[in-house]
Image (cartoon, grey):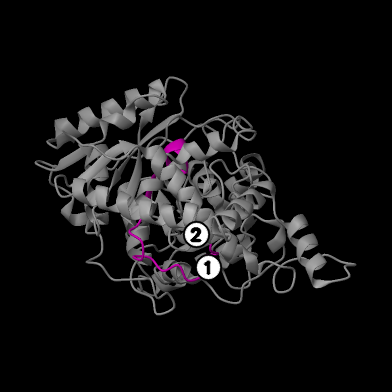
Amino acid sequence: MRGAPGTVSALTAALRNGALRLPEVIEPYLDRIRKRNDELGALLHVFDEGARSRARELQRRLDAGDWPGPLTGVPVAVKDNISLAGHPTTAGSRILKGFRPVYTATAVERLEASGAIVIGKANLDEFAMGSSNEYSAYGAARNPYDTGRVPGGSSGGCAAAIAGGLALGALGSDTGGSVRQPAAFCGLVALKPQYGSVSRYGLIAFGSSLDQIAPMARTARDCAALYNAIRGVDPHDATSREDGAPVDVEAWSQPPRDVRLGVPRSWLAAGLDADVRAGFDRCCARFAKLGARLVDVALPDPSWAVATYHILANAEASTNLARYDGVRYGPRAAGVASVDVLYAATRGAGFGPEVKRRILLGTYVLSAGYRAAYYARAARARLALRAAYAEVLQCVDALLMPTTPTPAFRLGEKLGDPLAMYLCDVFTIGANLTGWPAVAFPVGRNPAGLPLGAQLCGPLGGEDLLLGLVHRFDGGEPLPLPEG
């Protein structure tokens, strides 16, 4: 886009040296939103006047010699399950239509304190439950590389906004792969931070022991800038923690010689798309050429993690979503004769089919007579999985694996088969169950022009290591945006 650099680092450099002024930066994004957002379905709410006002305010500070922060002028989309005071926050659900929170999420406050401009709230699968963004109550988001295909989920609106040129970065949330899978489908870099390294205050809960607010951008350097802005302990979130220093992008110049990358070869067998496998093999060869040592490792079959995840996540969801009852949030069913009927009518009309499915599953595995057979066993399986990952990561510096089994699939292709949809996250769920950080990054495109992705996972506190490896892999060059 004319007048608007394509990366966070390029934009902030141009503003620092006076080559650009913020009002002329923000207008191309707002113009592109007007032209493309209806087609892409990326943003549910656009803050055009607020963005213009914020740009003018920041420019006055720049003119006065004050540099507001490392994200000055960066247009950012925020997933619509992250609170922004006074603005609609729907979580992609009818049951929260019209809801406006009275406080702003800590991560968003920190973004704005760093100079970012929140340009809009991004589409998502309802309550972040989905892998395609087709479960949104407000319409599906579409992949900018092929609008007949999904952008991934649940942070599909964030990915579509960046890849469609509507924003330079985004804050999504990742419960089972919800920023990494869309990043793979849309050619982006996305970091699922270590659990607790980013405050969840202001994030509408899905699975509280799994959820993590997570940055998305076009390059590892840009993703690091977003992460550095939002990371750190927060008194509003008792699970937040301070585990080491911020990501140091200035230390990324050295090649990754002697870095040991564990590759779970058994994961690359049946079910992996041929183009994804070819892209992953090229990724491995590239890291080897850069000096990394690739080591075959054995990890539990990823399908075990899928089963464990869907018991634990749905159990937590059934509890977290019990608060949406027509009394405190969203539209209330009218003409009802009792509280029980009120709850049933409100939740029946307000929740979509996937959310209802997960609430039912979660309630079942927590019910008397089944809790020990399902929930308690899944909790033990999670501990076993964490131990297996920890044992492997004593021998290697990080794990290297595909992000998704396939490239972006067609709209409607998996809607009739929930199990097929759940298996889209087969490679990403492990990082959420263990709490370790993971980074998804692009490794090229298939012959049809669709992005392909890989991911690096672990160790604890390894955000700097993982993002640095991605930066060295691609030389800091983003995947070209699609035409349009």
- Most frequent secondary structure within the magenta stretch: loop
When the figure is inspected, residue 212 is found, relative to residue 389, above or below; the finding is: below
Q: Is residue 401 left or right of residue 313?
A: left
Q: Is residue 35 left or right of residue 439?
A: right
Say if the magenta span includes residue 143. Answer: no
The one nearer the camera, 127 or 423, is 423
Q: Is residue 298 left or right of residue 357?
A: left
Residue 154 drawn at (x, y percent): 53, 48
The residue that appears at 65% across and 60% down in the rendered structure is: 90
Quadrant for residue 261, please give it: top left
Q: Which residue in the structure is indicated by mark 1? A: 54
What secondary structure is marked by label 2? loop
Q: Check contact, mark 2 vs mark 1: CB within 8 A.
A: no
Q: CA distance from mark 2 to mark 1?
A: 34 Å
Kind of residue at disc 1: Arg
Q: Where are the magenta residues, as a range?
A: 182-205
The one nearer the camera, 423 or 127, is 423
The one nearer the camera, 376 or 109, is 376
> Which quadrant would the C terminus be assigned to in this image?
top right
Quadrant for residue 343, please give it: bottom right
Q: Which residue in the structure is indicated by mark 2? A: 207
Q: Residue furthest front?
A: 369
Residue 71 drawn at (x, y percent): 38, 62
| Disc 1 residue crowd, few under 14, some 14–19, many 20+, Cα 10 Å | many
When the figure is inspected, residue 267 is found, relative to residue 172, above or below; the finding is: above
Residue 201 drawn at (x, y percent): 47, 71
